[in-house]
Amino acid sequence: MIKTAMIGLGWWGRHMVNSVKGSDKLEIVRMAARRPDRHRDFSAETGIPLLDNYQKVLEDLEVDAVILCTPHSQHEDQLHAAIAHDKQIFCEKPLSLTKESAERMVEAALDAGLILGVGHERRFESTMEEISRIVASGEMGTQMHVEANFSHDIFASVDADNWRGSTEEAPAAGMTGMGVHLTDLFISMLGPVEAVAAQTAKRVLDLPTGDVVTVQFKFQSGSTGFIGAISSTPYYGRFTVFGDQIWVEARDDSHPQHGGKTHLITCRKDGVQHSQSFPAKDPVRANLEEWADAVTNGTPYRFQDEQRIGNVAVLEAIAKSVQSGAWETV
C-alpha cells in the first residue's frame, strides 16, 4: 500500500481522489492546493487532511508519493523537489510542455530509481486495450491511417482567466486537456510521429487559445493521422485505426470520467462489421493502481520513457504549428 498525497484539487484532482477510494494498492493520506480555503469542504467530506503548501507534504514522513495534478509548467520543479525528498511521483498529463523539460524529468526519475507515473488513463480503457492488441498482432496488415476525436463541454464553465485556457499552459486549445491523450495512444500503437500540421479556432468560449484544435500527423512508419478536439460541444469520442486488411473503431457512450459503456467495431475485407460492447470501467483507477503495483512489486508499467518524451515533443510541435501555420518536425 502506497501512501500518497494529491497535489492540486481542481475538478480533476478531486475526481482522482474519489477514483482510488477503497483501493488496496494506494491511499490518499494528504492533500494540498494553492488556495486551500476553497477545499476545506472537500477535506471534511473525504476525511483527508489538507495542507497549505507543497513543501509541508514533502516533509511529511507518512507520505510515500505525490500525485501532481497542477499546472503543466510547474511539473518539472515539483518533480525535482519530490525526488530530493525521496518521494515516488505520478504526474498528470502533459508531463511538461517542451521536449527538453520532459527529457530532464524522465532522466531525473530514472537516475533516482523511481517509477514515473503519467496520467494517460485512456490506455486503460477496454476498447483501447483491445485495439492495441489487434494492432500489435499484425492482423491489420499494413497500418494506413489513424484518426480520433475527443470533444466535450467540460471546459465550457471554465473562466476566461483559468490556467487551463491560457496561452502559457494550453498553447493549442484543447490539446493539453484532451488531445494529448489521443497522441499518447497514437504513439503507443503506431510509433513515433515525424511531423504535424495544426490549426485552432475560437468559436464560442472566451478562452485565449480558442476552443477547437485539429491536427494532421505524419508517422515515421509512413502512416498518417488526424485529431480533432472541441472544448464546447456535447461529448463525442471516437478512435479509428485503418489497415489494408481491417479497420477497428472505438466509440464511447459518455466521457470516461462519467462511466458508461464503450463499443468496439471491426470490419474486415468481406465488409461485414462486428460490434461488441464493454461495461463501464474506471481507467483512472486502473492507471494509478498499475503504477502503484510497479512501485511496490516491480511489475511492468506500460509507459516507456521514449513514449513519455515523444508525446511532449509532439505537443510542442503542435503548438509551434499553430503559430507558424506550417508543418513542424517533431
Image (cartoon, rainbow, N blue to C red):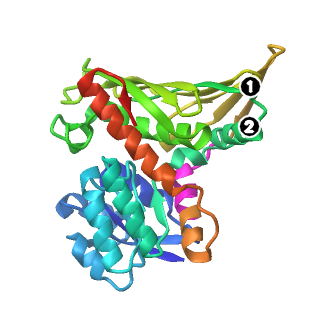
- Secondary structure under tag 2 reads helix
Number of numbered tags placed on the structure image: 2
Q: Which residue sits furthest right?
A: 270
Q: Position of residue 76 (x, y in %)?
A: 29, 60
Q: Nearer the viewer, mark 1 or mark 2?
A: 2
**Quadrant position of residue 18:** bottom left
Q: Which mark is residue 134?
A: 2
Main SS type for the magenta part?
helix
- Per the rendered image, the range of residues in magenta is 280-289
Horizontal side of 182 relative to 247 (left or right) equals: left
Disc nearer the start of the sequence (1/2): 2
Asked whether the viewer can see residue 223, the reply is: yes
- Secondary structure under tag 1 reads strand
Horizontal side of 172 relative to 235 (left or right) equals: left
Q: Which residue is mark 1?
A: 266
Asked whether the viewer can see residue 154, the reply is: no
